[in-house]
Amino acid sequence: MHYLRLIGLFARTSFQEEAAYRANFFLSLMYSLLNLGTGVLGVAVLFNQIKTVNGWDFAGTLALLGVYLTVGAMRNLVIGPSLEALAGMDGEVWSGRLDFTLIRPVDTQFLASFRKWRLFSLFDMALGLGVLGIATMRIHSDLTPERWLAFLIALIAGGAILYAILLAFTALVFWGPGVLFTWVFNGVFQMARYPLGLYPGWLRLVLTWVIPVGIITTAPAGALTGITSTGMLAGMIGLAIVLIFASSALFRYGLRHYKSASS
């Protein structure tokens, strides 16, 4: 309960900070609508020419886009802003402000992961869920309780994998304080807006097991359409567990090598 109260406090504080700059609201609104429009338009143009691509039809690809927008909004809501505060030339590791975080009587990884919120991302999440809802209406007759359950499991596992990857990339800042390593991930994550089946074999392997951004979106959408197998779902759960423990260990190892600004 203590940690839940802290999360509520962090969210309220972040909202007060964002409310001080009203122009940011309209800029964020324009960006969100543009991101939605280009995504939907790209899928519509593609499937206006063909019916399916490697087993993916319009409804399934639209569902994947909805998952991509929703997961991206979840990232931008709290995980991204919180972890990125550590990195870069103005980050806490470079400036030494991390010293004050380390002396607080709360787990450092918890603070680094949940202290900054970008509440406008809730609007992005609503857009993503809206796209996902439209897609599920198009495949409504094929949806079963088993598929919905597989979808929820894959979505949760995908969120855990996303967090683990971001935490691991952020941990690298302890060895390169002025570098925002998550920028590298941003470019790779853009590939998650399309099904894994659209990529060549070697790239599909990379996006599944090396930097597994592809399964974060493809597996949940595939669960709705029946493409995601039980084996892939089990492998995704196992991968999520392994990555969570590995990234947490890397982050804590990096903390032990952090050179305090006062040292």
Image: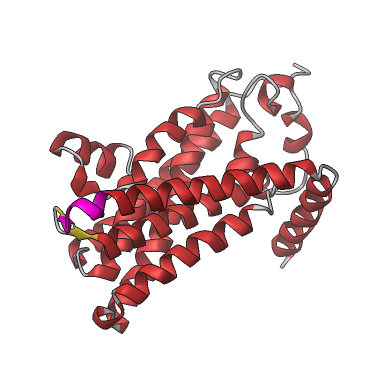
**Residue drawn at 56 percent across, 50 percent down:** 33
Residue 40 on image: x %, y %: 40, 53
Left or right, 34 with reference to 244:
right
Residue 91 position within the rendered picture, expressed as x and y whole percent measured from the top left: 68, 26
**Residue at the spot 29% in from the left edge and 70% down from the top edge:** 224
Does residue 238 appear in the picture of this structure? no
Residue at (78%, 41%) from the top-left corner?
A: 23
When asked about the image quadrant of residue 198, the answer is top left
Q: Is 36 in front, or is 205?
A: 36
Judge whether residue 231 can be spotted in this image.
yes
State which quarter of the image contains the C terminus. top right
Q: Where is residue 45 in the image (x, y as percent from the top left)?
A: 30, 49
**Quarter holding the N terminus?**
bottom right
Using the image, determine if residue 152 lies above or below residue 7: below
Residue 184 vertical position relative to residue 77 in the rendered view, above or below:
above
Instruction: Using residue 27 as the reference point, say whether residue 237 is left or right of it.
Output: left
Q: Is residue 31 above or below residue 148?
A: above
Q: Which colour scheme is used?
A: secondary structure
Does the stretch in magenta take in 49? yes
Q: Left or right: 237 with respect to 168?
A: left
Number of numbered labels in the structure image = 0
Task: Please report the bounds of the magenta region as a residue range.
Answer: 46-52
Residue 4, by quadrant, is bottom right
Left or right: 122 as drawn, with respect to 73: right
Is residue 127 a member of the stretch shown in magenta? no
